[in-house]
Image (cartoon, grey):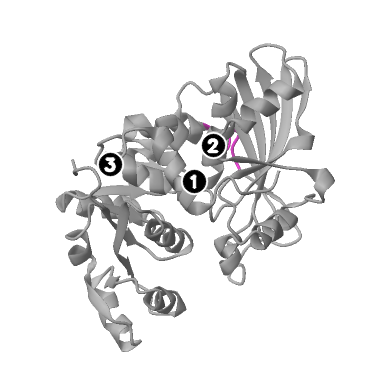
Amino acid sequence: MMQQRTKIRVAVNGYGVIGKRVADAVVRQEDMALVGVADIAADWRLRTAARKGYRLFSATDDSAAPMREAGLSIAGNLDDLLGEADVVVDCTPKPNGAKNAERYRLHDVRFIVQGGEKHAVAGHSFVAETSYASALGRSATRVVSCNTTSIVRTLTALKRVGLLKRARGTLLRRATDPWESHKGGIMNTLVPEDEIPSHQGPDARSVDPELDVVTMAVKVPETIAHLHFWSVQLARPASQAEVVDAFRAGSRIAFVRMRDGLTAINSLKELMADIGRPRDDLYEVALWEDLVTVKDDEAFYAYMVDNQAIVIPETIDAIRALVGQEQDAVSSIHKTNSSLGIGTVPV
C-alpha cells in the first residue's frame, strides 16, 4: 500500500469517449498523476492528447509505426506504460478489457475495467456510494455502465433511508455515442431489447445483491443521452417531500425542474455548456424534481443519464479505493466532486 500523500500514478489504456475524460479528470486530482495514455489510433484524438502534454504509448506493437508516421511522439509501448503505473484504467472497447486483464496481472498493476466487461473480469463491481469499502485494496474492479451507475445511485438513496422495497424501470437508450452517429444508429424506429429484464437490472445487483430491481429497455433514434422512468414500491407509505429529501441527500443526484424550462435532455446538455462543464458533461443523475410523484407506498420519477460522463467520477473514486490512498468513501467522493464541479448544477 502506498504511503499517504504520495501521488497515485495512473495510466489510461484507450483514449476514446471514456478514456479522454478519465485522463482529464485524473489531471485535476491533487493526489494523482497521469503517467500516460495508450492507444492504437493515429488520428485527431491522439493529436489532442499530445497538445495537452499527455505522454503517448502504443497499445500494440503494430500501432507504434503508424503513430510515429503520423507525427506522434511515442514514449514506449503498453508494457512500458504499465511499468510506471500504480493503476491502469482500461477504456478500450469491449471485450478488450477482459483480454488485457491478464497482462495487467502479469505486471502486478491494479486495474479498472468498464461496464461493458463482465463482472467476473475483476470479480468486483463499483459505484462509489455503495461498494467503495469492498473495493479497498483490491487488485481490480469494474466501474459499471452508465445506466447501471444511475440505477444504483438513485435506489441507494431510497434504500439508505429505509424507503426502498422494489423498483421497476423503463430505459430509453440513445442509439450510439454522439461522435460516432455518422457510422450507424437507428432512424425512424424503436428497438426493444430482446429480453426482460434487460441487463441493467441484474447488473445493478452485481453492485448491491439486495436490490429487487427489474428493467426494460428500448433503443431510440437519438444520441444525446439516456432517459429513465421508474416505478418504485416503497417500504412504507411516504410523502413526496420524503422521497425528494432522500434523493437530495445523494452525492451525485442533481435536481432539475420542468418549470425552469429544462423540459428535455437537449436543454439539460445546453445547461451544462452554459455553466462551463468540460465537453458539456453531466456527471450527476439529472432528476426532475417536479415529476417526482408519490401515491401511498408508490413513487414515480424520471431522470437523464449522460452516458459519456456519469462514470467518470466513479472511476476516480475507484482509483483511490484500489490503491487505498483514501480509506473513507465520503472523503474520496468529496474530493472528486470538488475537482469536477459536481454539485454546481443550479437547483
- Upstream in sequence: badge 3 or badge 1: 3
Q: How far apart in space, not on screen, are marks 3 and 2 (Cα)?
A: 20 Å
Work out whether 209 lies above or below 102. Answer: above
Q: Which mark is residue 32?
A: none
As drawn, is 208 to the left or to the right of 279?
left
Residue 198 lies within the magenta run = yes
- Upstream in sequence: badge 3 or badge 2: 2
Magenta region: 194-201
Q: Amino acid at mark 3?
A: Gln
State which quarter of the image contains the N terminus. top left
Nearer to the camera, 185 or 235: 235
Residue bearing the label numbered 1: 337
Q: Where does residue 291 sit, x and y in percent of width and height?
A: 78, 35
Q: Quadrant of residue 40?
A: bottom left
Residue at x-position 44% and y-position 49%:
116
State which quarter of the image contains the C terminus. top right
Residue bearing the label numbered 3: 325
Q: Where does residue 237 sit, x and y in percent of width and height?
A: 72, 12
Residue bearing the label numbered 2: 251
Q: How far apart in space, not on screen, are marks 2 and 1 (Cα)?
A: 8 Å
Q: How far apart in space, not on screen, are marks 3 and 1 (Cα)?
A: 17 Å
Residue 95 lies within the magenta run = no
SS class, disc 3? loop
Q: Quadrant of residue 34?
A: bottom left
Circles 3 and 2: CB distance less than 8 Å? Answer: no
Nearer to the camera, 316 or 106: 316
Circles 2 and 1: CB distance less than 8 Å? Answer: yes
Residue at x-position 19% and y-position 43%:
3
Q: Amino acid at mark 1?
A: Asn
Nearer to the camera, 270 or 125: 270
- Upstream in sequence: badge 2 or badge 1: 2
